[in-house]
Image (spheres, helix red, strand yellow):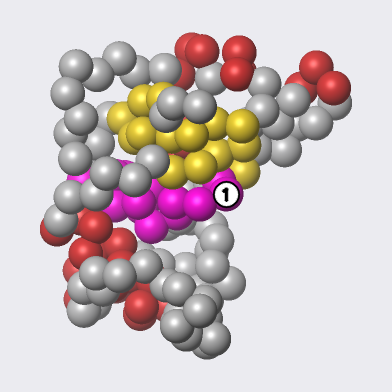
Amino acid sequence: MKPIWLSVDFVRSIVDPFEVDPWGSGLVTHQMMKESNPIAEPWNPDDDDQLWNIEQQAGRIRWLVENEWKDPIYIDVGVPTLGYYLKTILDGHHRLGAAIYKGDSAILCFVDGQLDVIYPHIVKCETIPY
């Protein structure tokens, strides 16, 4: 499967990490992110059995805003034709938060589910902005 460039606005409509707490550690605000210490490495359960606190979540988004990343995020858009309407982000909340904060128009995604759901939201990009 190849990743697809999708509209940040569409992906944000699934879960906006500045409006919903996807990590269970509290709501990250733009101000909190600006004041946080950047964290370069993503959380790894093999290295740290403690979940990150809200300041660490904000720090990870800040690092991604200030640096480039190439990893696509993973989303599931459900299968509406079979009655499965749940849309979710499986991996990539910090990257999406960084893309929202930076004002990016597109984000690279691996997509599971009924692909015709995303057709109107595909963004054609000549170059990768990361």
Q: Circle 1 is placed at which residue position?
A: 90
Closer to us: 72 or 93: 72
Q: x, y percentage for residue 23?
A: 54, 67
Q: x, y percentage for residue 96?
A: 38, 47
Q: x, y percentage for residue 9?
A: 41, 32
Q: x, y percentage for residue 103?
A: 23, 40
| In this rendering, position of residue 128 left or right of residue 107 | left
> Which residue is found at the position 34% from the left and 18% from the top?
123
Which amino acid type corresponds to the residue marked 1 in the rendered image? Answer: Leu
> Which residue is found at the position 85% from the left and 22% from the top?
82
Q: Which residues are magenta?
A: 89-102
| In this rendering, position of residue 91 left or right of residue 42 | right
The answer to whether one can see residue 120 in this image is yes
What is the chief secondary structure element of the magenta stretch? helix
Note whether 92 is above or below 111 in the view shown. Answer: below
**In magenta stretch: residue 42:** no
Q: Quadrant of the C terminus?
A: top left
Determine the secondary structure under disc 1. strand
Quarter holding residue 43: bottom left
Quarter holding residue 115: top right
10 Å neighbourhood of mark 1: few (<14), some, or many (≥20)?
Answer: few
